[in-house]
Image (cartoon, rainbow, N blue to C red):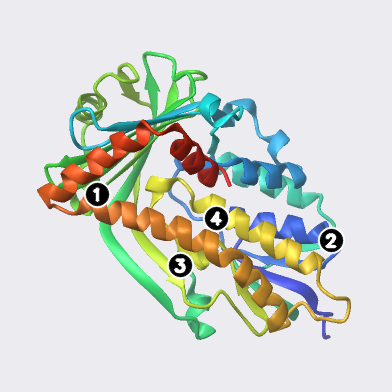
Amino acid sequence: MHRAPVDVLIRGDGCVGRALALALSRQGLRVALRGRPPAAGGPDLRAYALNPASRRLLQELRVWDSLPAEARTPVHDMKVHGDAQGAHIEFSAWQAQVEELAWIVDAGELEAQLDAALRYAPHVERVQEDVPHTLLALCEGREAGSRAALGVEVELHRYGHHALAARLVASQPHQGIAWQWFRQGAHGPEILALLPLDRPEPGRSYALVWSQPAAAAQQWAVAEPAEFEAELNRLCAASSGSLTLASERKTWPLQWLRAREVCGPGFVLLGDCAHQVHPLSGQGLNLGLGDVAALAQVLRRREPWRPLGDERLLRRYARERALPTLLMGGGADALWTGFAHPSPLLRSLRNQGLSLVNQLPPLKRWLAQRAMG
C-alpha cells in the first residue's frame, strides 16, 4: 500500500524542528516530523537566551504563554567584564528603550511546551522513518548526518573548548541581571556567564554556562561541589552573592560551523544543521527560530503554481538568512578569536575597546538592537 506524500518531512524534533512543524501546520501544510528516541542522561541543564523576535514567533505559535512563569525570566541588564581591571560594558533595557533585553528560558521546558502544542496541531504526524514528501527540512542539530548524504559541504572550526552547564542558587536576588566574564584561566581563555533563571528558586537562581578548554571543563564537571562552588565564587567576585550548586553538571564541545549551501532541489537546512555559533553571543536558538520564521514566510508567499521543493523558491529563504547568519556567526567567532589571542597588545586593545564602547550610548543601543533581532 502506497501512502500519499506529505508536503514537508522534517528530520529533527528539537526546538527548531518542532517550531517549524507548528508554523507550517498553521498554513494547512501536511507535515511529518521525524525525530530520534529520547537520549538518556538526566535533566536538560541548558538555558536559552531568547530575543524579542524569537518571543514573537513563539507567541504566534501559542507556546510562549504556556511556559510556566519560573521557566522564562526577563533580563533587564547585562554586565560584561573583560580580562583587564576596569574593562567592562553594560547594557540596560532602559537605555535600549525596551521592556527587556532578552528572556532566559529553560530548554527542557520549552521543548516540552512545543511538544504539547504539537499534540493539538492539525496536519502534523510523528514518524519513525522517512515518508514520501515534496520538501525535506533538515533540523537535526549539530550531528546532522543528512547534510553529507545530500552533498552539502560545511566550513568547520573546533574551538577545543567545552561548555559546562549547571544551575546555581545565589544568596542575593538576581534582579534580572545577566553577568559575563572574559578571563584568562590557568589552562587558557575562559568565558563565564550567569543567566538569571527562576529555577530552582524564584528570584535567586542562575543558569551557568562556562566555556573553557576541554580538559579544564572535564575537571570542573567532576570536582567536589564545595571545590566547584569556591572557584565560582572566586571568579564572580561576589557580584551575585554567594553561589551554591543546585544541579548536576554537564559539558558539550564547542565549534563554529557554516553550511556552504542551506538549500537545494527539494531540501533546506535550518538551525544548528545550517550554522553553529559560540555560545558567548547567546544567539544559537535565536538564529534557528529566525530560520523558521523566514522559511515559513517564503512558503506562505510562494506562487500557487510553484512546488514547495522548487530550488528558486528555496533560494529566497537562503538570501533572507544569509546576512543575519553571517553577521551573528562571524561576529561571535571574531570576538572569540580576538579574545583568545595571547598577544599583550591585542589584549590591551580589546579591553580598551570594551570600555570605549561603554561610553558611547548610541553605539551600545545599536548593538543591543542587533542582538534583539
Residue type at mark 1 is Phe
For mark 4, give the secondary structure.
helix
Q: Distance between the residues labelled 1 and 2?
A: 45 Å
Is residue 318 positioned above or below 219 on the image? below
What crowding class fits label 1: few (fewer than 14 Cα within 10 Å), some (14-19), or many (20 or more)? many
Residue 182, image x and y in percent? 26, 40
Q: How far apart are marks 4 and 1 (CA)?
A: 23 Å
Question: Disc 3 or 2, which lies upstream in sequence?
Answer: 2
Which label lies toward us, 2 or 4? 4
For mark 3, give the secondary structure.
helix
Which label lies toward us, 3 or 2? 2
Residue type at mark 2 is Gln
Is residue 93 positioned above or below 138 on the image? above
Q: With 327 as the anchor, is 343 left or right in this view?
A: left
Residue type at mark 3 is Glu
Residue type at mark 4 is Leu
User: Toward the viewer: 47 or 185?
Assistant: 185
What crowding class fits label 4: few (fewer than 14 Cα within 10 Å), some (14-19), or many (20 or more)? many
The residue at which mark 3 appears reads as 143
Residue 264, image x and y in percent? 61, 82
**Quadrant that contains the N terminus:** bottom right
The residue at which mark 2 appears reads as 27
Q: With 247 as the anchor, is 336 left or right in this view?
A: left
The residue at which mark 4 appears reads as 287
The residue at which mark 1 appears reads as 339
Question: Disc 1 or 2, which lies upstream in sequence?
Answer: 2
